Image (spheres, coloured by chain):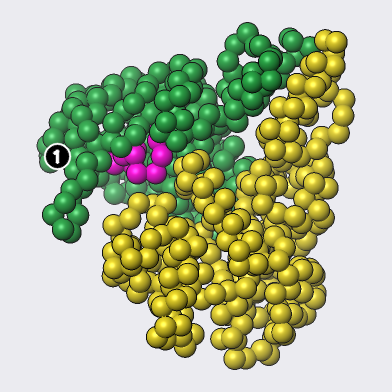
Chain colours: A green, B yellow
Amino acid sequence: MIKIIDLDHEYRKDNNASIKTLNMVNIEINKGDFVSIIGHNGSGKSTLAKHLNGLIIPQKGEVLIDDIKVSEDHNIWEIRRKVGMVFQNPDNQFVGGTIEEDMAFGLENIGFPSKDMMERIKYAAGKVGMGNFLKRPPHKLSGGQKQRSAIGSVLAMEPDYLVLDEPTSMLDPKGRKEVIEVLRELNKKDKMTIILITHFMDEVVYSDKVIVMDMGNIVLQGTPKEVFHNKEMLAHINLELPKAAILQELLKTKGINFKDEVLTKEDLVEEIWQLF
Amino acid sequence: MAVILENVYYKYDVDDNTSEEYGIFNISMKVEQGTTVGIIGKTGSGKSTLMQHLNALYLPQKGRLIVGDFIIDKKSKNLKNLRKKVGMVFQYPEDQLFEETIYNDLAFGPKNLGLSGDELNSAIRGAMEDMELDFESMKDRSPYELSGGQKRKVAIASVLAMNPEILVLDEPTAGLDPKSKNDLLNLLIRIKNKRNLTVFFVSHNMDDVFWLTEYVYVMCDGRIVLEGAVTDVFKENQTLKELDLGVPFSVEVLELLKKRGVYEGPLDPMRLESLADLIADVLRGKND
């Protein structure tokens, strides 16, 4: 379980002024959850994510990963083994000449026995659907394949938690879909805990829990349906609803009454079909 | 400025023992002054290579480009005057900010092109005002202190400060939240009209392409495989899917409604408001 307790973070500027990027944040994430974090640029999402594996050490408050304190220096390697991170730009995350080498890099760093390495790499690559591409160099991969490989390299370390900071924002629609499908699969089949930071409202509708941040504060949290029900609050902090929900709202203003609020186009079409 | 490409060919010299070819092959286009064209295609389809020909970052190995009065072929030299006219906004342009003040960042390009004094000053002021950045209060600030959205605006302003007549926008809204994204696209439309620019818009977001552009080129494996008026291209939803490209949201919804037997008309791309009108009409028609 991840526990974030009264977490504060201030970013100091040159002129001694400071900007509060996290303000008394409290979150609990259970093992096996799929949690999405949304908020506009500068809302504190990435700062929060970087606390989860000690890339940023708490200035005030605490982050506990399975009761291990991120704030204590000697815990850092244990924390980083438990919490794998994937970032926005797949090109910045490759260190190896091929996928296989890239996956081996992390394992070698933790002194993983070389006789078992190939088996582990094949397992991790298989999980992200890249098993047939092990000898491929990164420049011969699509964006979605690169990002799936990056996820695979993290999985090879067998983390307990997977944190992804806008992993799809540089991908084309197919790449986006591939990455989200891999995440949903890992969550469902392997009970991997997923913490997904994203700007794409259509990606969060599959989460167990959505956390909405604004100016360093958590302003909403709940299931996707609960969160997107707060339309005024979301509009107030400049977040959009998923497209299907926007369309449903437009239809309501034209006097069409629906039974349920929807978040996906498939559900909306079902609702429309029932009215037909 | 109008842009004409005649059988432009550029092949990368990749030596990795595969038969795959990288580059652009036999590309011809004719873009009228003042239009906005969309360039779509999956990652690696040649979009960026094509765009980098427009200001002669790459010279065509075969064929030629006619950009305004400039003719570009494999032997072209002295391209500084062309580069003034073609502004390139690459993905995540804020990564290229490097000066201590916003003013200096915007001055870098125009100075290199020989602008100075009042001319330089007014180019910078005009670019900042167009990007809705207050000249007096912001010119001496560090670009690094700004928020992500503001940094992006400064980076685009530094391209506009060169007073280009053609603007290439490669995923200009990547990584922005929905509100910042819509604001920036609205702003770019206003600037395009005010400055009467010819715009090349490269994007994976088909709804944005539908919103901004009049004509669309679809690329695959370095070739143009489909082109036409934006409403016509997005009617080819089967072809677009085969090319791993998306279609506008309206087309997806209408397709699902058709499968359910609720709707029988054409799968036209349209804005959400029009889609709501259409669906409302369909439901009313049935209930009358």
Residue occupying the point 37% across, 21% down: A221
Query: Disc count in the image?
Result: 1
Question: In the shown orientation, is residue B75 left or right of residue B259?
Answer: left
Chain letter of the residue beneath label 1 in the structure image: A
Magenta stretch holds residue A45? yes
Q: Amino acid at mark 1?
A: Gln
Is residue A46 shown to the viewer in this render?
A: yes
Q: Nearer the viewer, residue B113 or B228?
A: B113
- Is residue A32 part of the magenta span, yes or no? no
Which of the 4 image quadrants contains residue A165?
Answer: top left
Residue A195: x, y in percent?
39, 31
Q: Nearer the viewer, residue A46 or B195?
A: B195
Question: Counting other residues with Cα less than 10 Å from the Cα at mark 1, is it few (<14), some (14-19), or many (20 or more)?
Answer: few
Q: What stretch of residues is rendered in magenta?
A: A35-49
Mark 1: secondary structure: loop
Q: Does residue A155 appear left or right of residue A131 in this picture?
A: left
Residue assigned mark 1: A59
Q: Quadrant of the C terminus of chain A?
A: top right
